[in-house]
Amino acid sequence: MMDSYEDYSDQRSLSLDDTSSADESQHGVGLSLESPADATPYISQRFSTHDDAYEFYSEFAKRCGFSIRRHRTEGKDGVGKGLTRRYFVCHRAGNTPIKASSDSKPQRNRKSSRCGCQAYMRISKNMDSGVPEWRVTGFANHHNHELLQPNQVRFLPAYRTISETDKNRIFMFAQTGISVQQMMRLMELEKCVEPGYLPFTEKDVRNLLQALKKFDQVDDSVDLLRMCKNIKDKDPHFRYEYTLDVNERLENIAWSYASSIHSYDIFGDAVVFDTTHRLTSFDMPLGIWVGMNNYGTPCFFACVLLREENTRSFCWALKAFLGFMNGKAPQTILTDQNVSLKDAIEKEMPRTKHALCIWFIVAKFPSWFNAVLGERYNEWKSEFYRLYNLEMIEDFELGWGSMVNSFGLTTNRHISNLFALRMHWALPYLRNHFLAGMTTTGPSKSINAFIQRFLSAQTRLAHFVEQAAVAIDFKDQAGEQQIMQQNLQNILLKTGAPMESHAASVLTPYAFCKLQEELVLAAHYASFMLEEGYYLVRHHTEMEGGHKVIWSSQDFIINCSCRQFEFSGILCRHALRVLSAMNCFQIPEQYLPIRWCRFYNTTPVKVLQGSLSEHADRVQALQSMVSSLVNESAKSKERLDIATEQISMLLSRIKEHPASVSVQRY
């Protein structure tokens, strides 16, 4: 029998077996939501079938902010005469008993949404007119829980549906190899709906794809391991690690290539670990480690496939990654907002600064705040970016409180979570940590495009590692072409300052352009010496504020309160203004980091100790020849075409030639 619903207003018991009317059910305490009279169930309301009654009540519930389920059926016309009474109740009706624990089979007692809600509708079969029909004989719309808003109720399981047309569309997308996240964005565009307003979620799509899989996972994982072994046999510097579960099925696998390991040795100071994608064909979470080289182009470090997204799996992935990279942890690692990954990084990389990728956070803003803020969404977004780019922690926290109050977001859970994690994403908290500029728009878009092209390599899991290697090699070639184009461009000096020409001769064009921007802007600032070695640098149009710069002429050490050098490896306009005032004609060597220099190439060789001097001399001579080649080639289009063609041929020949005995590959 169904549990009785208690009405706490008058301490009487209201049984759903009672033939109560709407008037008799007006004393419940919970939250009610009025609806138009013609859309609200009422006693004696008639329906042709019980399914019609269910659909009507379901639509009513959706408008009110809850969902319903079929609860109990009765038959009182005798054996074989069919149903005579049905009950539909709120999805939070009843109470879920706690499962008994067992040592042999542990149970997870998940928190239930059921809280004994008494809202219901009862219908009974009637034959008075000679034609069977269903009439409402009981109805109560009193809830002991909060009802959901229209933008929230659609996420209830009862209202999350995928039509047959959408299923076919999703299956077609899956065959092309795009991610579930990309599928959602495409379908939002096709249906002209705001992000997050499809009638189903990413989880629903993944569950559907899991049911649509057409091949045997076990056989495919065996092929994958065989593929890794074949690559290892051909290239002893290829590295991979994997684990099997108790059934000898593939659980986790990670791999990296020789060129990637060498790139990490040079540019592994700041790393993005993107775990937001899945390998569609195998429905496994995919993690990709990516960095930024000295020419501002993304470089691949390693890849991992995991069975589960939990702390244990992420710990294994990070250990495997550190093993590939000879135990060298990055200074900074940027990730998505994943609690399990955060815990794993704290455990496996305790000295690494963990930051959150701002582009992952911003991508969720439309679904988080569009419906909440309405017309003020763009205004709020501008204010968020202003706070994000502040320099001082005190200014950020003061501005954040003002923003929350101004936009009425005091109780918004996303805002609360963002503030709780502010030390991991807001720039005022990160400026002491090197991020290689990967938080700015240009590099973040470049990295995202790199990852998307990398993902396009996937078809079957067994071929992914091999195809990914081809994709990486293609990207390396594209990167080299981009680097060559950068080097062949005429560098236009804008200030005429000796510091500018000095930096142009040392830094890559990508890094030099960043420094040149600061040099140009430095001319707009005035410097005031407060005391020996201490300066205040302020824009010429401002009468207050400014940045504090400390300069030691003996040690050639300079520090600015904006901390741009610590953050990006590029000196700021404030420090450059002081250096100029102190008649410095060259930028101190320690402020031209090797990772941004031209001669820091990515050729995967390690020079033996005995040949360091000779090797350096030969590299320097080659650089001098290349510099002359660039200057002569840039004088006309015809010369540039000849140089590009010949250099491409020469580069191909050099790559085919084996390394000499004076170098050791690793």
Image (spheres, rainbow, N blue to C red):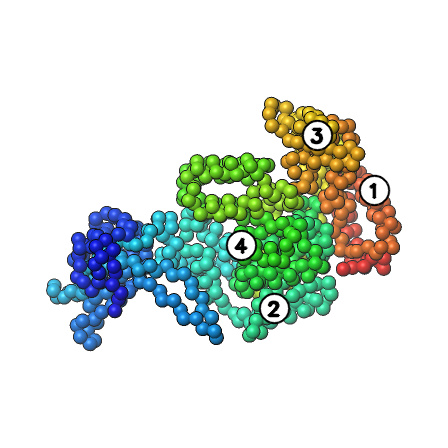
**Residues at badges 2 and 3 in contact (C-beta under 8 Å)?**
no
User: In 3D space, how far apart are the residues under numbered discs 2 and 4 (Cα atoms)?
Assistant: 23 Å
Q: Give the mark nearest the N terminus, 3 or 1.
A: 3
User: In 3D space, how far apart are the residues under numbered discs 3 and 1 (Cα atoms)?
Assistant: 39 Å
Q: Which residue is mark 1?
A: 624
Res. 161 mark: none
User: In 3D space, how far apart are the residues under numbered discs 2 and 3 (Cα atoms)?
Assistant: 57 Å
Task: Identify which amino acid the numbered label 3 is placed on.
Answer: Tyr
Q: Give the mark nearest the N terminus, 2 or 3.
A: 2
Q: Which residue is mark 4?
A: 338
Q: Which residue is mark 2?
A: 243
Reply above or below: 33 against 251.
above
User: Circle 3 sits in a helix, a strand or a loop, which is it?
Assistant: strand
User: Circle 4 sits in a helix, a strand or a loop, which is it?
Assistant: loop
Task: Identify which amino acid the numbered label 1 is placed on.
Answer: Ser
Q: Residue 135: image x %, image y %?
A: 18, 60
Q: Nearer the viewer, mark 1 or mark 4?
A: 4
Q: Residue at x 86, y 47 (%)?
A: 617
- Dividing the picture into quadrants, the one containing residue 512 is top right
Say whether residue 191 is visible.
Answer: no
Q: Nearer the viewer, mark 2 or mark 4?
A: 4
Q: Residue at x 59, y 65 (%)?
A: 252
Q: Which residue is mark 3?
A: 534
Q: Is residue 171 left or right of residue 579?
A: left
Q: Residue at x 60, y 25 (%)?
A: 544
Q: Nearer the viewer, mark 4 or mark 3?
A: 3
